[in-house]
Amino acid sequence: MGQSKIVHSCEAAVADIQDGATLIVGGFGLCGIPENSIFALRDKGVKDLTIVSNNCGVDDWGLGLLLANKQIKKMVSSYVGENKIFEQQFLSGELEVELVPQGTLAERIRAGGAGIPGFYTATGVGTEIAKGKEQKVFGGRTYILEEGIVGDFALVKAWKADTLGNLVYRKTSRNFNPLAATAGRITIAEVEEIVEAGELNPDEIHTPGIYVQQVVLGTFYEKRIERRTVLSRKQAVTDGGDVR
């Protein structure tokens, strides 16, 4: 049986993350984010971080906590619309931002994890996204070259793990997490439950343990909803819904 990858706390898990590191962080908005690891990073106080993530959370939660603490130097994201501090720091020149189309961001992370240095995509051709990038024509259509992304560390959130680092995600919280898990030189998986090796059904494992170097048990989850949308009874009936 292989060696256990369990570490005793999030503080210990992030201990090797130093100033200037590049982190790939799983999650989508506030769904499936490594809440406890983000707290530990905030308390550690590391600065000048480059964060690759779908977005930067909100002002007082998720990656927004690191932003408010001025620990992030650069964000590589596809959406930044829920964070006023993000806007302020960007407009003041404190924060460098690289906006990437969401599908391209996912593929850049996936490519990095697969050892693929670059790929061509039609997304962004003829826009600001294409500036300075190599272009080629395939089948009469123009494509731009995008580079894969590899992080010094990846922080991901899973539902379950075994002691060997095999991971299972739960429903929509899977989102960017499996991609991020493959693309960190050191991947730290924060989980809600840890079981012994062999207890997970092999057919249900989403991320094989070979990609994961550390597993830490989260102690508390608030699991906030970024933006709650409700459907009125009147609208549901109008739309043909069955409201009882």
Image (cartoon, rainbow, N blue to C red):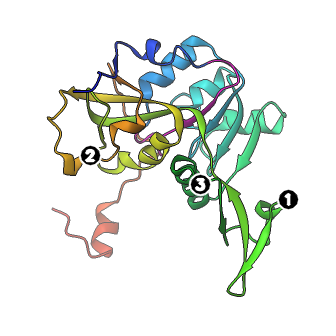
Q: Which percent across, then down, holds residue 111?
A: 56, 54
Residue on which the image places disc 2? 205
Label 3: element kind = loop
What amino acid is labelled 1 in the image? Gly
Question: Which residues fall within the magenta stretch?
Answer: 18-32
Residue at the (70%, 24%) spot, across then down: 20
Question: What crowding class fits label 2: few (fewer than 14 Cα within 10 Å), some (14-19), or many (20 or more)?
Answer: some
Residue on which the image places disc 3? 116
Q: Which percent across, then down, holds residue 114?
A: 51, 51
Q: CA distance from mark 2 to mark 1?
A: 40 Å
Residue at the (36%, 25%) spot, across then down: 215
Q: Quadrant of residue 222?
A: top left
Q: Quadrant of residue 53?
A: top right
Label 1: element kind = loop
Q: Are marks 2 and 3 in contact (CB under 8 Å)?
A: no
Q: CA distance from mark 1 to mark 3?
A: 20 Å
Question: What crowding class fits label 1: few (fewer than 14 Cα within 10 Å), some (14-19), or many (20 or more)?
Answer: few
Question: What crowding class fits label 3: few (fewer than 14 Cα within 10 Å), some (14-19), or many (20 or more)?
Answer: some
